[in-house]
Image: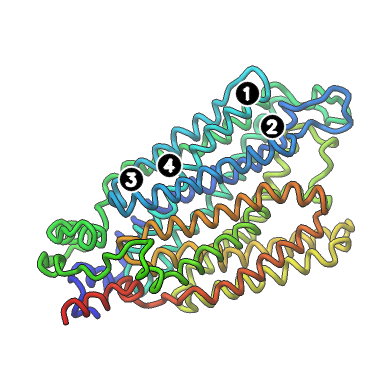
Amino acid sequence: MARDQLQVLNALDVAKTQWYHFTAIIIAGMGFFTDAYDLFCISLVTKLLGRIYYHKEGADTPGSLPDNVASAVTGVALCGTLTGQLFFGWLGDKMGRKRVYGLTLMLMVFCSIASGLSFGKDPKAVMATLCFFRFWLGFGIGGDYPLSATIMSEYANKKTRGAFIAAVFAMQGFGIVSGGIVTILVSAAFKARYPAPPYENGAGASTVPEADYVWRIILMFGAIPALLTYYWRMKMPETARYTALIAKNAKQAAADMSKVLQVDLEVEQEKVDQKTGADYGLFSSQFLHRHGLHLLGTTTTWFLLDIAFYSQNLFQKDIFTAIGWIPKAKTMNALQEVYKIARAQTLIALCSTVPGYWFTVALIDKLGRFTIQLIGFFFMTVFMFALAIPYHHWTIPDNRIGFVVMYSFTFFFANFGPNATTFVVPAEIFPARLRSTCHGISAAAGKAGAIVGSFGFIYAADYIGVKKTLIILGVVNFSGFLFTFLVPESKGKSLEELSGEAEDQNATET
């Protein structure tokens, strides 16, 4: 295939791992670091929001967010993310990956700060303002998914492409850990400076007025890493595959990649002008014939994964409280509760989430995407049923550590498994002119699953109990295992081979 391929694309495919690869991983990865921080830090402060804004005089337990408010606060950013994935995915194919890359980042910076400055005279106004800005924060985050994945796939060589894309996504793990660490540090500092009694010893005094600053600082901190990478994003050249295959500008593609690869590349404008084979649209019968099952596979597996993954991540605190790993709320003051929730979630992330991501990075180009996704879904199913069926056993105080270990394994195999591979594969198997759009559609299906998980888990846990909810999540994981068989293996092949563009070029020449 290399003989028929443009020289600039072949040079990218066979390039040895160089400094520019790591630069691209860091620039794209810091966006994902911010994405994860912003999406998951809200789960660390929802209990605090309940104590501050929904305190009831004389109540036996601290104030908590009503179910509808809790669902909105945790889920509204996911709704924004879904919308952003579809919009910016489409825009990335129309205007270019780089041109809209900076816009998503600045939107994330502005809305992170604005979320922390949410204002209002009463709880309803504060929550409405918070939800408004978190929707638009999610909109910016949504754009980062298809753009970062597509840019990294189009910059990478074919030998280690999976590891590079997975490394970008693995920055999510550091974002989740950083959210926990920032929360621990901020809550510990305020706790030391403004001591307060437990709720049961003084309901009103247990939540100091200064606690209102804590959640705001935590949310606003997410703007910092995004702001630091803006300049470098703007300096990245457009990908050669967009410039050559979509914009049809061979001269610019060769000039850009000559600087990146530090080699002289031939301008092949005539060859670019002949590449017309993959001009079919998303809604054409040709796309349906070639990639319809692939798109069905990437959307359904991401959808099913995120139902389980987000419900587990966003509601860890509820599960840990239910099994007694975090003390009852009334035995702590507001800042103690924030501190202990953050400590528990950070421990889980450090011991299972982060290692799972990097196991994928290390093995994805050896085992392949398909194998890792099957392994992940299989063991997520096994461990979820192992938690759910003997659920009463895990609630006994002596067995709680065992529950936490098993729960950690579900996170490990989510990340050494479908949470990484569902991000990688859609950036590889679709044609260049539809790559960002199809990744955006796949990611949006995932966020639809995340919305089902985040909105549905609250009501399911309340109305049918944690045990039955965990059984349902086990069934969801097994369904993901089955739908994985629709997704092709993309290890070791060029993007043009995977998408069929190489075949189209051969057909055009003959």
Q: Is residue 30 visible?
A: no
The answer to whether 335 appears left or right of 264 in the picture is: right
Residue pointed to by mark 4: 226
Please state which of the two labelled residues, at mark 1 or mark 2, is closer to the viewer.
1
The answer to whether 107 appears left or right of 321 in the picture is: left
* Residue 49, numbered circle: 2
Q: CA distance from mark 1 to mark 2?
A: 13 Å
Q: Residue furthest bottom?
A: 510
Residue pointed to by mark 1: 125
Residue pointed to by mark 3: 100
Q: Quadrant of the N terminus?
A: bottom left
* Residue 451, numbered circle: none
- Judge the density around disc 2: few (<14), some (14-19), many (≥20) Cα neighbours within 10 Å: many
- Residue at the image position 67 percent from the left and 41 percent from the top: 71
Query: Where residue 112 appears, x then y in whole percent?
Result: 50, 35
| Amino acid type, residue under disc 1 in the picture | Ala
Query: Where residue 9 appears, x then y in whole percent?
Result: 23, 68
Query: Where residue 471 appears, x then y in whole percent?
Result: 76, 64
Taking 496 as reference, is 89 above or below it? above
For label 4, the SS is helix
Q: Nearer the viewer, residue 144 or 88?
A: 88
Taking 365 as reference, is 134 above or below it? above
Q: CA distance from mark 4 to mark 1?
A: 28 Å
Q: CA distance from mark 3 to mark 1?
A: 32 Å
Q: CA distance from mark 4 to mark 2?
A: 25 Å
Q: For the residues labelled 1 and 2, say whether their Cβ atoms are less than 8 Å apart.
A: no
- Judge the density around disc 4: few (<14), some (14-19), many (≥20) Cα neighbours within 10 Å: many
